């Protein structure tokens, strides 16, 4: 479709009557004619517009048509504009202008032959419009190619995300199965063993001490099953915005002290020691059960990845925040992994003794965020890790659900 493209024509002659006559000859619906009465005027029009054709009178006072054409040849903007010289002199004279680079140079003889002028101009106008139409098509093509490339890039990102999601789901399934199987295997083996003893009437296997140890082992396995299931439920509660936070007033230092106490036996079994130092009292309004869950997770990790070295736990107030810091001297976490351990199902593959679902820190951070606080890590690989929980000391928050709190 060529119709919307207008071609601009420049006609240059020192005599107004010649300009009038020429305009009458070359004008048309698809053209816009600009007149110039001198080379200077022509140059300023040439800088302002994009012309399809310049028709130059050769004999003009001051700068003549050939000199103007020389100047046009020297300028980037005008060097490709086709030129038609109009001259009263003989043909030999017309060929005096050579070497115009575009090659699009033609000549018209005065007195003008109306038909010859019209058809010459029509050829140049058509050429210009075809070239413009082609340019527009090329631009449209380029635009659609760029859009396609962008779409392709988006598709690739989506595909990678999908692949990652599928990999995570598969990993998750196998980790969950493994994590569920371990305590279940322990329980089933114990049960079979007890059945065997019962079948043989072996009462020796059921002394009070042995029974006590059995019950403790069973309880541990059952608790770890419950923890796994609770973690999975928490994740689904977080996703659906149903993890409720029920704030009540309590002393954070006391809660941490109790938790450290609870973990002493576990630490002793690993030959590790937990040192606790507390700011006297840090009373605030938080969900006690949930904060206990956060602290327990950090202590479990410190023991799990702490290589049996001493663990320091402290509570303190800083800038209107109540803080809990759990510092171990274990394997540490490199900077890259620090970015992802707070995401669900993310575990550091190379971490020895890694045994969880990779949900603990995700849940812990979401709980802390729901309280308007933060959970941060500072670590150098091989030199231990320090996790810090910060909770606002100020107001006692009303019961809130996680979605409201985190999307705020
Ligand atoms: P998991 O149940 O796998 O421990 P978490 O979400 O609690 O899940 O932790 C995610 C990962 O972060 C762990 O698998 C471990 O690689 C790393 N990590 C957590 N705490 C520590 C720590 N104190 N020292 C070293 N690595 C840690």
Image (cartoon, rainbow, N blue to C red):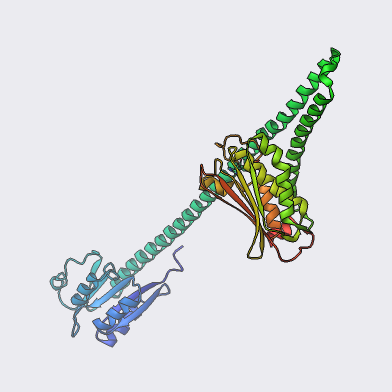
Closest to the observer: 283 or 225?
283
For residue 140, side relative to residue 16 (left or right): right
Q: Position of residue 390 (x, y in %)?
A: 65, 58
Residue 67, image quadrant = bottom left
Quadrant of picture, ligand 1? top right
Closest to the observer: 343 or 29?
343
The single residue placed furthest to the top in the displayed view is 200
Q: Quick check: 341 above or below 52?
A: above
Q: Quick check: 378 above or below 111?
A: above
For residue 75, side relative to residue 276 (left or right): left
What is the total number of numbered labels drawn onto the structure image? Answer: 0
Can residue 359 be seen here? The reply is: no
Q: Quick check: 14 above or below 107?
A: below
For residue 382, side relative to residue 65 (left or right): right
Q: Which residue shows up at 66% across the image and 32% down it? A: 174
Q: Position of residue 351 (x, y in %)?
A: 57, 37
Q: Quick check: 305 above or below 255?
A: above
Closest to the observer: 51 or 195?
195
- In the rendered image, which quarter contains the C terminus? bottom right
Q: Position of residue 205 (x, y in %)?
A: 81, 19
Can residue 316 be seen here? The reply is: yes
The single residue placed furthest to the bottom in the displayed view is 16
Closest to the observer: 370 or 221?
221
Residue 36, image quadrant = bottom left
Q: Which residue shows up at 69% across the image and 49% down it? A: 295
Q: Position of residue 154 (x, y in %)?
A: 54, 50
For residue 166, side relative to residue 4 (left or right): right
């Amino acid at each position: 479709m060529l119709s919307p493209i207008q071609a601009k024509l420049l006609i240059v002659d020192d005599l107004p009557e010649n300009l009038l006559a020429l305009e009458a000859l070359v004008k048309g619906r698809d053209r816009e004619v600009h007149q110039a009465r001198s080379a200077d005027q022509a140059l300023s029009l040439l800088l302002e517009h994009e012309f399809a054709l310049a028709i130059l009178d050769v004999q003009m006072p001051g700068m003549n048509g050939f000199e103007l054409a020389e100047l046009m040849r020297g300028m980037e903007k005008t060097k490709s504009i086709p030129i038609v010289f109009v001259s009263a002199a003989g043909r030999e004279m017309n060929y005096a202008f050579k070497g115009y680079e575009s090659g699009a140079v033609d000549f018209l003889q005065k007195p003008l032959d109306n038909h010859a002028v019209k058809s010459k101009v029509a050829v140049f106008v058509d050429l210009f419009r075809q070239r413009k139409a082609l340019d527009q098509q090329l631009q449209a093509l380029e635009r659609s190619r760029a859009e396609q490339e962008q779409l392709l890039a988006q598709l690739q990102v989506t595909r990678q995300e999908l692949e990652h999601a599928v990999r995570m789901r598969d990993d998750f399934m196998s980790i969950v199965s493994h994590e569920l199987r371990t305590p279940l295997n322990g329980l089933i083996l114990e049960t079979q063993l007890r059945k065997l003893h019962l079948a043989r009437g072996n009462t020796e296997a059921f002394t009070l001490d042995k029974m006590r140890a059995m019950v403790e082992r069973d309880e541990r396995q059952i608790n770890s099953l419950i923890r796994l299931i609770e973690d999975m439920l928490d994740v689904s509660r977080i996703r659906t915005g149903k993890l409720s936070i029920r704030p009540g007033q309590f002393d954070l230092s006391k809660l941490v002290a109790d938790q450290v106490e609870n973990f002493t036996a576990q630490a002793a079994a690993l030959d590790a020691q937990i040192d606790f130092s507390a700011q006297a009292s840090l009373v605030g309004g938080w969900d006690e059960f949930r904060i206990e869950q956060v602290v327990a997770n950090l202590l479990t990790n410190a023991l799990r990845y702490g290589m049996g070295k001493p663990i320091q736990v402290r509570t303190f107030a800083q800038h209107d925040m109540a803080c809990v810091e759990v510092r171990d001297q274990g394997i540490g976490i490199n900077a890259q992994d620090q970015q992802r351990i707070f995401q669900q199902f993310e575990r550091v593959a190379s971490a020895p003794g890694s045994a969880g679902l990779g949900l603990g820190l995700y849940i812990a951070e979401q709980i802390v965020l729901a309280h308007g606080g933060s959970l941060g890590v500072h670590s150098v690989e091989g030199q231990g890790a320090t996790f810090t929980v910060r909770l606002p000391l100020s107001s006692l928050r009303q019961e809130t659900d996680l979605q409201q709190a985190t999307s705020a």
